[in-house]
Amino acid sequence: MEIGGAIVTETVENIPVADEPESSQLSLSTAAARNLATTTKSVPQMQGITSRWLLRVLPWVQVNGGTYRVNRRLSYAVGDGRVSFSTTGAEIRVIPAELTELAVLRGFDDAEVLTALAGRFEQREFAPGDVLVTTGAPVDELYVIAHGKVNKIGAGQYGDDTVLGVLADGDYFGDHEVVEPQGDWDYTIRAITAGTVLVLPRAAFQEHIDQSDALRSHVARFLAAPGKPQNTHGESAIELSSGHDGEPVLPGTFVDYELAPREYQLSVAQTVLRVHTRVADLYNQPMNQVEQQLRLTIEALRERQEHEMINNREFGLLHNADLKQRIHTRTGPPTPDDFDELLALVWKEPAIFLAHPQAIAAFGRECSRRGVYPDSVDIAGHKVPAWRGVPVLPCDKLPISKARTTSVMLMRTGEASQGVVGLHQTGLPDEYQPSLSVRFMGINEQAVMSYLVSAYYSAAVLVPDALAILDNAEIGH
């Protein structure tokens, strides 16, 4: 600036100017860009899908007629079932009809006498370590265990005591001895846990025998009946001769069959899948809506199928194991000793253990406590734990009780091995998967399409020693 012929230089300071943004946007934001982008999507996920090991490893038998008959050699019933009870508060009573599970009352059907006998049982409590009966003492009572666990102890080969068996809920002892003229206990019963036992005095039993002609005749036939020739499995014997020379008369024989063999009907799990036509028409990219709905529905059906094959009261494996093939844990949690006991029951080609994941964890803790480390085996590319070379497979369909106990199963599989098999029928109309059909049922007035989804299945135990169960295994110990 020139003032009076002189040039004056000014310094401009503190002149306010418009503020610029601290970070100006130089490109399209990601939020806006997403409007032009196509997302990458997963197929619908479902938390309820499990490995379903039972369905994967069980051999499947084609059942063309919808019914599978298991023919066996004739076996004789020996009255080795378990007794059931009714509970009212702290009072426990024997269900009268359940007394026919006792060998001495097997086949006795006089309801009035059975009710009177059930009313004569006395309830007693026992604590761990209590001795209920002693070897050599006279038999004066019949015992039925309502709750708890006891050891049956006898003399071993070298004079020491040995555990002959473990008895628990529903088991009984003394039924043979209490009706013999001069019966003595040849074993000792010692309690492992606290529990309750129902006791029928010998005098009370004898009183009813004296009063009832039907009961007196039944017991007399029981004591006098000669044992039917049978093998160690209860099957009718096949007479043979061996180790002879010369020309002895050889025995004649035949193989007797069961007159009323067990038949298994294929069970079914079904549902109706509904999909609106507008959804199937307009929202079918990039994934087929009907296909995804059907996939998840089938997964749920297969989960229900495995649950039924284990828990169904008609054909489920838990309810169809022979009572001789059910054992109890020695202490509480599942231990290597208990798994060895299962292997002793299914010793002919054992195929798989099946246990709840929490039971497998409890078994692992017991192994770690003992310094034992189970091996692992490869099944279809998966490493799974194994005991004595037999894989231990997880299955969450095995129930856990309120007391945090569960069961462990060991089975032999396949028809050729006389084991456990799955039953199904392939070649169904509109079959989508083996023994699973999907039928289009039409479109209703609301423009909703319907599909009937059906799965047919069952399971069979061909011979009793193909399946063994470890009951009441504690997983919260």
Image (cartoon, rainbow, N blue to C red):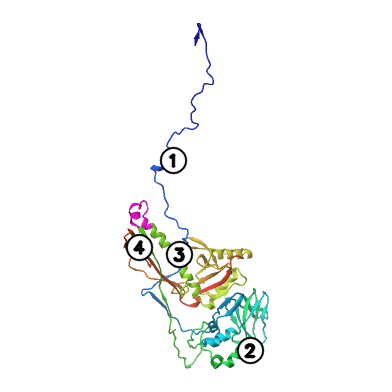
Is 69 covered by the magenta stretch?
no
Q: Name the residue tied to disc 2.
A: 203
188 left or right of 252 in image: right
Q: Is residue 209 above or below residue 357?
A: below
Q: Which residue does the image show at 56% across and 64% down from the upper left?
A: 358
Q: State the separation of the CA atoms marked 2 and 1.
A: 91 Å
Q: Which residue does the image show at 54% across and 87% down from the upper left?
A: 112
Q: What range of the chain is rendered magenta?
A: 276-291
Task: Tell me the element at label 2.
Answer: helix
Task: Name which of mark 4 and mark 1 comes first in the sequence.
Answer: 1
Residue 303, which numbered label?
A: 3
Residue 451, which numbered label?
A: 4
Task: Name which of mark 4 and mark 2 comes first in the sequence.
Answer: 2
Is 287 covered by the magenta stretch?
yes
Q: Amino acid at mark 1?
A: Thr
Badge 3 vs badge 4, beta-carbon distance below 8 Å: no
Image location of residue 365, percent across then percent down: 60, 63
| Circle 3 crowding by C-alpha within 10 Å: few under 14, some 14–19, many from 20 | some
- Give the quadrant of residue 208: bottom right
Confirm whether residue 155 shows in the render. Answer: no
Q: Is residue 281 above or below residue 2?
A: below
| Circle 2 crowding by C-alpha within 10 Å: few under 14, some 14–19, many from 20 | few
Image location of residue 426, percent across then percent down: 36, 69
- Give the quadrant of residue 190: bottom right
Q: Name the residue tied to disc 1.
A: 30
Q: State the separation of the CA atoms marked 3 and 2.
A: 54 Å
Confirm whether residue 28 shows in the render. Answer: yes
